[in-house]
Amino acid sequence: MNFHVLTLFPEMIEQGINTSITGRAIEKGLISLNAINIRDYAGNKHGQVDDYPYGGGAGMVMQPGPVYRSYESVTEKIGYKPRVIYLTPQGKVFNQSMAEEFSEEEDLVFLCGHYEGIDERVLEMIVTDNVSIGDYVLTGGELPSMVMIDAISRLVPGVLNNDVSAEFESFNDNLLEYPQYTRPASFMEREVPPILLSGNHPKVEEWRRQQSILRTMERRPDLMEKAELTKQDIKFIKS
Ligand code: 6GU
């Protein structure tokens, strides 16, 4: 999976992604990061990439030329037109199923806006997906693109140490993850649930499933409509 990020702050993306699990995935060649400075494609020696909005109003708008030329640097390199994700609070809200769908692509382009936005014409020309990461306003698309790259990378085979851990976690069956414990068995007079020390793996699995259900009902009742429940789960909820 090759991530191409069009941004005015490429070092912010590099710092964020060349670290921890995604950094290791890059070293292993499982993913690559190509952070492209839109300013390198400014048509003038001053490196100006924004201008006043036609019709007036506050702030500045990113000009179409530099954005388009930075996009062309990607299409010329890879030889086809990839999906281009524009990070915007006006987009569809990102979720795990979108992460799964995007993880099937060979290349993904992330377009990060700043100021009051990007000239609409270049967006019409190149953007295939408008995506938001939630209903709040950020200063630019850099953090959202890093959020998406992280969520997508961990679905790429080999990125996580444990190849089953991408399955046994929050949002599997649309339920939240069960609680985890490690040594010591007693911490400030709080004990690890005894079932986890029993060695009875079927009972442990049953307890974890029940904890997932209880936690989801308490913290995210909205997810219960979408939860994929077994007959046993329903019997437990009614008990
Ligand atoms: Cl993708 N961009 C910005 N600027 N703010 C956001 C966002 C994106 N998603 C939530 N808030």
Image: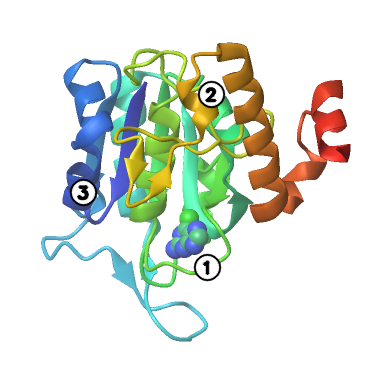
| The N terminus, quarter of image | top left
Query: Picture coordinates of residue 151 (x, y %)?
Result: 44, 36
**Label 2 – label 3 distance at C-alpha:** 34 Å
Ligand 1 within 8 Å, label 1 CB: yes
- Identify the image quadrant of residue 101: top right
Apparent side of residue 221 relative to residue 235 in the rendered image (left or right): left
- Read off the residue under disc 2: 168
**Label 1 – label 3 distance at C-alpha:** 23 Å
Which amino acid, mark 1?
Tyr
For label 3, count other residues whose C-alpha is less than 10 Å away and answer few (under 14), some (14-19) or many (20+).
some
- Read off the residue under disc 3: 10
**Labels 1 and 3: the sequence-earlier one:** 3
Helix, strand or loop status at disc 3: helix
Q: Is residue 86 visible?
A: yes
Q: Which mark is residue 136?
A: 1
**Label 2 – label 1 distance at C-alpha:** 29 Å
**Labels 2 and 3: the sequence-earlier one:** 3
For label 2, count other residues whose C-alpha is less than 10 Å away and answer few (under 14), some (14-19) or many (20+).
few
**Labels 2 and 1: the sequence-earlier one:** 1
Which amino acid, mark 3?
Pro
Which amino acid, mark 2?
Phe
Query: Picture coordinates of residue 39 (x, y %)?
Result: 21, 55
Ligand 1 within 8 Å, label 2 CB: no
